Image (cartoon, coloured by chain):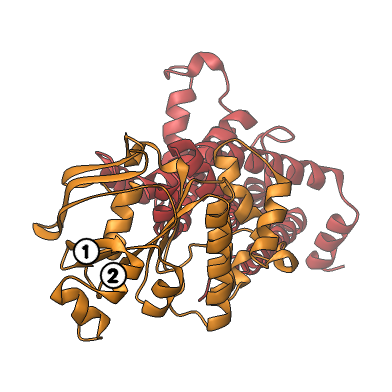
Chain colours: A red, B orange
Amino acid sequence: MTILGQAAELVLSADAELVGIVGLSLRVSLTATLIASLFAVPLGAALAIWQFPLRQVLIVISTSLMALPPVVVGLIIYLLLSRAGPLGHYGILFTPTAMIIAQSVLIFPIVLALTREAILPLNRDYKNLLDAWDVNPIQRLKTLIWDARFAVITGLLAGFGRALAEVGAVIIVGGNIAGFTRVMTTTIALETSKGNLQLALALGIVLLSIAVLINALIHWIGSFGRKYQVTR
Amino acid sequence: MTGLKLTDVSYSVDGIPLLHGISFMQKNEGINAILGPNGAGKSLLLSLIHGVIRPDMGLVTWDGVIAHRNKHTRGFVFQTPIVLRRSVRANLAYPLKIIGKSNSAAIDDMLELSHLSTLADQPAASLSGGEAQRMAIARALITRPAVLLLDEPCSNLDPASTKLIETMIHTFVADGGSVYISTHDLAQAKRLADVVLFIESGLLLEHKSAKSFFANPATSEAQAYLNGDL
C-alpha cells in the first residue's frame, strides 16, 4: 500500500491518535478564536466608529501586529510563562492553555483588522440614521456588529484558519508533548522529520479538508450576506 | 408656545455661512413645507431643526427643550433611504428596540400602512426605491413621534410611490402629527402644505400659509422661484 493509501486509511478508520490530535487542535484553535474575538471584535468596531486620541496609533500598531512572526510571539509568551518569567507561577507553560494564549495573541490583530474593515463602510452608511435616532454608543456598537455579522464571521473564520495552521508559536509554548500538547501542525513537522509520513500525511489531509471547509463557509456566508447589502 | 422655535440660528462650514440668522416659531400642527432652490439650505435647516447638527449660533427648541435633547420625540427620513441590513420587519422593529419596546401589532400596522406586508420578511436591501422610502417612513413613524421630518422623500420616485407616501403623510397628520417636509416639487407642496418656509441662500425669506405663499409671494426671490427662474 502506498503512503497516501496508508494515510487515507488512518483518516477513514478514525485512528485514535489522529482523532486525539485533531480534537486538541480544534479545541485550542476554537478557544483561541473565541477569546481573541471577544476583545478584537468590539475594539475593531470601536476603531471603525469613533475618532479618539491615539486612534491612528492603535490602527498602525494593530495592522503591524498582523505581520508578527509566530515564533517571536511564541518566544515572548515562553519568556512570560517560563518559571523565571512574571507569569511563571501559574505553571501553564507546555500546556494547551499556553497554546491558546499564543494563538489568541496571533489572531487578535487579524480579527481586529477584518472587523474594522467590515464596519467602516457600514458606519458610513448608518451614521446619519443612528445620529438621527440618538442611538447610544453601546447600541451603536451592537447594531453595527450585528449588521456586519456576515463579514465579521468571515473574519473569525479567517482567524480560526490562521490559528489552526500555526506551528511556530505553539511548538515553543506547547512543547509538542505526545497526547498532551501535540496538535496537527506540530505533529506533521515532527513525524515528517522522523520519517513517519503516514501520520503526517493523514493529518495534512485533515488540515487541508478543514481549510477547504473554512473557505467554503467564508464563501457561503459572503454570498448570503450580500443579499442584505443595498446595491442601488 | 408649544412647538418649534428657532432663535437667530446660523450655521457655517469651513467659514462659509450656509444659514444666517433664521428665526421663526411654528406650532406642532399640519404640514410645513420647506421650499427653496438647490443649495438654499433646506436639508441643512431640516437637520438643524431635528437636532442632528447644532447651530454655530442661536437656538433651536421644541416645546422649550433644546432640539438635540429630545430627538426621540421626532421621526426623521432622509432623501435617500438608509436601509439596515435586515429584513423589512426587523428594520421596523429597530427603533422600538432602541427605546426598549417591542410591539408586533405596531409593526404589522406599519407594514400595512406602507403596503409592505407581503415583503415583511424579505431583506430590506431588495426593496425598490419607492418601497425603501415607504419603509423608512414607516420606521420613522413606528415609535409614534409627534413630529415627522422628511427630507425630499419623493425625489426620483414615480407618481404611484409618491401618492402612497403622501397618503402615509396625510394619515399621520390626521392622527394629530405634524410634518416638516423639504421638497423641490411645487405641485407636491401645493397638494400637501399648510405652511411654507421659503429659504434662499441660507436666509428665511418667507414664512406664511401655503395658500398665501402660492397666491402672493412677498419677495422677488419667491416670485422668481415659483416662476421657475430661480
Chain on which label 2 sits: B
Q: Quadrant of residue B76?
A: bottom left
Residue on which disc 2 sits: B213
The amino acid type, in three-letter code, at marker 2 is Phe
The quadrant the N terminus of chain B occupies is top left
The reply, left or right, for residue B72 in relation to residue A163 is left
The reply, left or right, for residue A14 in relation to residue B171 is right
Depth check, front residue: B182 or B224: B224
Query: Where does residue B166 sit, x and y in percent of width and height?
Result: 53, 69
The quadrant the C terminus of chain B occupies is bottom left
Mark 1 and 2 residues: CB-CB less than 8 Å, in contact?
yes
Query: Where does residue A152 sit, x and y in percent of width and height?
Result: 55, 53
Query: Where does residue B100 sit, x and y in percent of width and height?
Result: 59, 35
Instruction: Tell me which numbered mark, 1 or 2, is placed earlier along the sequence.
Output: 1
Q: In percent of the image, x 85 and y 55: which residue is there?
A: A10
Dot 2 falls on a residue whose secondary structure is helix
Same chain for marks 1 and 2? yes
Front of the two marks 1 and 2? 2
Q: How many marks?
A: 2
The reply, left or right, for residue A56 in relation to residue B50 is left
Residue A229 visible in the shown view: no
In the rendered image, the vertical position of residue A118 relative to residue B116, given as above or below? above
Query: Where does residue A112 sit, x and y in percent of width and height?
Result: 46, 47
Label 1 environment density (alpha carbons within 10 Å; few <14, some 14–19, many ≥20):
some
Residue on which disc 1 sits: B206
The amino acid type, in three-letter code, at marker 1 is Glu
Q: Which mark is residue B29?
A: none
Q: In percent of the image, x 83 and y 62: which residue is there?
A: A8
Q: In percent of the image, x 20 and y 79: which residue is there?
A: B223
Depth check, front residue: B164 or B89: B164
Dot 1 falls on a residue whose secondary structure is strand
